[in-house]
Structure formats: C-alpha cells, structure tokens
Image (cartoon, grey):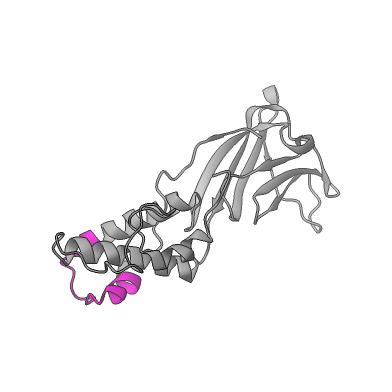
C-alpha cells in the first residue's frame, strides 16, 4: 500500500468548549473574559499536542489522501491511515486517459460497482456488484479518498485528561510563580521519560494511552 498525504486540515481540531467545558473546570467565572484569549490558546495547543502524541485524530478531522491503485492484498483494498473512520466523503478512481470515476458505497441492499469500508480499521475494499472484491485500477496516486476520522463524541476520558493538562499549564504558568510551581507531588508531576512527555500529569497518562494509534498515522 502506498499513499501520499494531502490532509485538508493542517491543524488538529480542538474538542473543548471554553465556556461550557474549561471555565467551569478551572473555576473561572463565565463572566470573566479578561483571559479568554490565553485560555483558548491553551485549548487549541493542548488539543493539538494530545492528538499528535496519539498519532491519530481524536476530534473529527477531515483528510484527503492519494493512493496507488492495484496495491494491497490482491490489489483489492487500501488502508486509510487515520481511524476510526466516521464517514467516507468521496472515493475517486482515475482510469488513465479515461479520467476520474466517482465510486459509491456498496451494501447488501445497494449492489453497485464501488467500495466497502471497515470503519474501525480503515480498510477500504474495491468491489464488484455482488459484494465481490476486485483490484483497484492500477496507477500511481490514482485513487483519491476523502474521509472524516476521529471520535464523535470525543471520549470523556480524553476530555478529562486534556482538561487536566490545560489546568497544569494554567496553574504553573499563569497562576503561580515559576520558581514555586504547584502540583509537584509524585502523582501530579509530569515525567519526561514517559510516552506523554513532560507536560502530562502521571495520573492522566493512562486515560490517553489507550487511544494511541501504533503503526500507520
């Protein structure tokens, strides 16, 4: 399987709302807007960092990739590198000089010459009518797939861990002197030797590690 990335979104999406999610968690009054810019920057930055570390989108994110046709097992399937797949937006297969052919999803009740998707793993299979696998049309970068990946809604454990990471930054960079940071007991102290790096309190790492994607992505 070979592909070239052309992600439509160069930024991982934020998945916490400033007013409804973060301010209550930090005990910041909703009427206090004096620090909204800083808080929103923390939401955006930590949300992006969490997803980069996980190697996958956690919030709904749209991608567009080019794949080489006639690849994979007997050339019948492609593996979308970001999962879980929420929705396949479009699948276009270029047949050399014949140009683009837009394919649609085949289901047991809709028998078409198209594709099937295993949404959990991202396996996209080319099929004849009758639910029979067939090879993708051979070519270099001739299969273009656009899809949404991530979780909807974002798991509560991910939201909690992200809010705790934001709180740690907030408490240690905005609320206290840097010479006397808070939350430095063993359970809350970030550990740079661990997978989640130097900014994630130890008690929050297990909540996020279960969502890390190993391999493609």
Q: Position of residue 119 (x, y in %)?
A: 65, 55
Left or right: 78 with respect to 89?
A: right
Nearer to the camera, 31 or 178: 178
Residue 171, can we see it?
Answer: yes
Left or right: 35 with respect to 84?
A: left
Instruction: Determine the image quadrant of residue 16.
Output: bottom left
Q: Position of residue 67 (x, y in %)?
A: 62, 34
Instruction: Determine the image quadrant of residue 159.
Output: bottom left
Instruction: Determine the image quadrant of residue 163.
Output: bottom left
| Quarter in which the C terminus is drawn | top right
Q: Position of residue 114 (x, y in %)?
A: 74, 44
Residue 104 among those drawn in magenta: no
Q: Residue, x 47% and y 43% (percent of image)?
A: 8
Residue 36, can we see it?
Answer: no
Q: How many marks?
A: 0
| Quarter in which the N terminus is drawn | top right
Q: Given the current orientation, which residue lies at the most extreme top position?
A: 97
Q: Residue, x 68% and y 41% (percent of image)?
A: 78
Whether 198 is drawn above or below 8: the answer is: below
Q: Residue, x 68% and y 22% (percent of image)?
A: 97
The residue segment tinted magenta is: 19-39
Residue 20 among those drawn in magenta: yes
Q: Given the current orientation, which residue lies at the most extreme front position?
A: 186
Whether 214 is drawn above or below 74: the answer is: below
Q: Residue, x 26% and y 69% (percent of image)?
A: 183
């Amino acid at each position: 399987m070979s592909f070239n990335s052309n992600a439509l979104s160069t930024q991982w999406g934020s998945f916490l709302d400033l007013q409804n999610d973060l301010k209550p968690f930090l005990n910041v009054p909703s009427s206090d807007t004096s620090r909204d810019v800083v808080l929103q920057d923390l939401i955006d930055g930590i949300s992006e960092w969490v997803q980069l570390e996980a190697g996958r989108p956690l919030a709904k994110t749209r991608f567009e990739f080019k794949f080489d046709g006639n690849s994979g097992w007997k050339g019948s399937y492609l593996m979308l590198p970001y999962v879980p797949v929420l929705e396949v937006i479009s699948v276009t297969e270029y047949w050399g000089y014949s140009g683009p052919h837009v394919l649609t999803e085949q289901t047991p009740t809709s028998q078409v010459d198209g594709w099937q998707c295993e949404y959990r793993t991202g396996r996209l299979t080319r099929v004849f009518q009758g639910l029979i696998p067939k090879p993708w049309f051979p070519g270099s970068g001739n299969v273009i797939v656009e899809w949404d990946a991530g979780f909807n809604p974002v798991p509560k454990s991910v939201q909690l861990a992200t809010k705790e990471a934001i709180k740690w930054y907030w408490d240690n960079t905005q609320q206290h002197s840097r010479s006397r940071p808070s939350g430095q007991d063993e359970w809350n102290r970030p550990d740079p030797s661990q997978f989640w790096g130097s900014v994630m309190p130890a008690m929050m790492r297990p909540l996020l590690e279960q969502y890390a994607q190993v391999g493609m992505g």
